[in-house]
């Protein structure tokens, strides 16, 4: 029976980040995954590393720190994660939306983050394929992107090089506690692993792992679909998003878009991401359908409708495939990055919804500091598991 200092459950963007930072501190780490690396949501998403879609305050601070850590990771690991920092643009449709965007940018700039408004001429000079009636935009120069699966593989291999053991195709069946209720071991379908610490990085499956130690984790799967276009002429140079995306993401009542009931129902908002293969991805949608990862024709049509609205040229470009992934959704839109007081040695790093790629590094860094007893470099109370017990 093997013994490890820490067992990390889940080898997606979050789990591999946690394993990487723990291994850098010299801990004996096992990264346990029921499938292969990037088996779950990480294999079914885009590679956003953004502050642009974050609410002012701690949400943005967390994302910005993670952006800085990505640059360190790129220089540290011996693996190409296809990291690029080209910035992003958020497109503004109306004068009312301009007012909301302008207020948002003022708050972010006051906090020291690199954002600026772009007028009509500037936005069309920068991205000539955008629809003529778009009145402006918001530019965020620090935003970046990577290949999510390459990120997970690169971090897992770096952790392995630091001494971590990668246990893929090991399904966790149970977590045993000692007589004091503290973590004692992890039971997989390949055998039992002794450990004093477990980090639950299982994403949408985190609640199932939580039940193994007798706790309820309020994370739900929220499905998102993505269209993949054929290789074509360059449509846009960088990530381009409709500003209404933030309203769809957070369910904001400040401003309602002029969209059909179907678009509103599924939280559809245009997200354009060019790839290194001369094609692009189109998102995004939000639907509560349990663990169903089947694509929906209705949602696909809605994604195409919003894409063509902002990029009329896309009506002549073919979609070669579509896929759906499950975001680990927390009701207050903040992840859980926290120890669990009731179960000594049990930690949660899950519930990042669509921000798992971008927040992976900062999550890994914070969890490693918690486990080693260091002071965390950012305040973590907002992400505490205990916050749900107070409500």
Image (cartoon, helix red, strand yellow):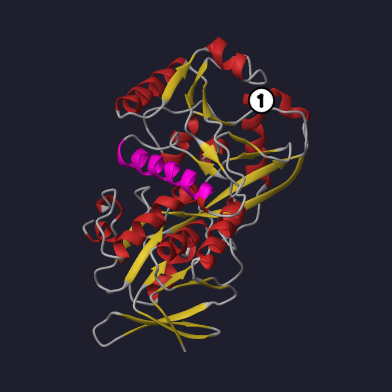
Res. 103 image quadrant:
top left
Q: Is residue 346 left or right of residue 307?
A: left
Q: Furthest residue to the left?
A: 390
Image height of 250 relative to 25, above or below: above
- Residue 296 is situated, as x and y percent measured from the top left of the image, at 65, 49
Q: Residue at x 41, y 39 (%)?
A: 251
Q: Residue at x 32, y 26 (%)?
A: 107
* Quarter the C terminus occupies: bottom left
- Residue 113 is situated, as x and y percent measured from the top left of the image, at 37, 30
**Label total for image:** 1
- Residue 286 is situated, as x and y percent measured from the top left of the image, at 52, 46
- Residue 118 is situated, as x and y percent measured from the top left of the image, at 49, 16
Q: Secondary structure at mark 1?
A: loop
Q: Which residue is mark 1?
A: 311
Q: Is residue 241 left or right of residue 389?
A: right
Q: Which residues are magenta?
A: 57-75
Q: Residue at x 70, y 43 (%)?
A: 228
């Amino acid at each position: 029976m093997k013994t490890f200092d820490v067992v990390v459950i889940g080898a997606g963007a979050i789990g591999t980040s946690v394993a990487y930072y723990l291994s850098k501190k010299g801990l004996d780490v096992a990264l346990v995954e029921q499938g292969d690396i990037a088996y779950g949501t990480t294999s079914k998403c885009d590679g956003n590393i953004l502050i642009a879609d974050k609410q002012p305050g701690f949400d943005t601070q967390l994302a910005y720190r993670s952006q800085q850590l990505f640059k360190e990771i790129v220089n540290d690991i011996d693996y190409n994660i296809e990291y690029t920092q080209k910035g992003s643009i958020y497109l503004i449709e109306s004068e009312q939306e301009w007012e909301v965007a302008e207020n948002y940018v003022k708050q972010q700039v006051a906090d020291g983050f690199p954002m600026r408004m772009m007028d009509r001429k500037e936005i069309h000079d920068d991205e000539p394929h955008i629809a003529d009636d778009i009145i402006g935009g918001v530019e965020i120069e620090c935003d970046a992107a990577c290949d999510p699966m390459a990120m997970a593989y690169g971090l897992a291999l770096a952790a392995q090089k630091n001494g971590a053991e990668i246990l893929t195709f090991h399904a966790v069946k149970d977590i045993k506690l000692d007589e004091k209720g503290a973590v004692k071991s992890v039971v997989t379908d390949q055998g039992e692993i002794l450990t004093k610490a477990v980090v639950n990085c299982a994403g949408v499956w985190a609640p199932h792992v939580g039940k193994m130690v007798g706790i309820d984790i309020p994370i739900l799967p929220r499905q998102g679909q993505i269209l993949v276009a054929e290789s074509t002429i360059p449509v846009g140079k960088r990530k381009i998003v409709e500003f209404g995306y933030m309203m769809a993401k957070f369910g904001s009542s400040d401003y309602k878009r002029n969209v059909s009931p179907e678009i509103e129902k599924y939280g559809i908002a245009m997200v354009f991401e060019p790839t290194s293969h001369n094609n692009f991805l189109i998102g995004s949608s939000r639907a509560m359908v349990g663990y169903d990862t089947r694509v929906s024709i209705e949602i696909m049509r809605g994604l195409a409708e919003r894409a063509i609205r902002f990029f009329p040229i896309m009506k002549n470009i073919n979609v070669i495939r579509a896929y759906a992934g499950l975001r680990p959704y927390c009701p207050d839109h903040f992840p859980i990055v926290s120890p669990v007081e009731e179960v000594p040695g049990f930690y949660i790093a899950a519930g990042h919804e669509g921000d798992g790629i971008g927040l992976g590094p900062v999550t890994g860094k914070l969890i490693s500091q918690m486990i080693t007893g260091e002071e965390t470099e950012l305040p973590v109370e907002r992400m505490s598991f205990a916050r749900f017990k107070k409500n």
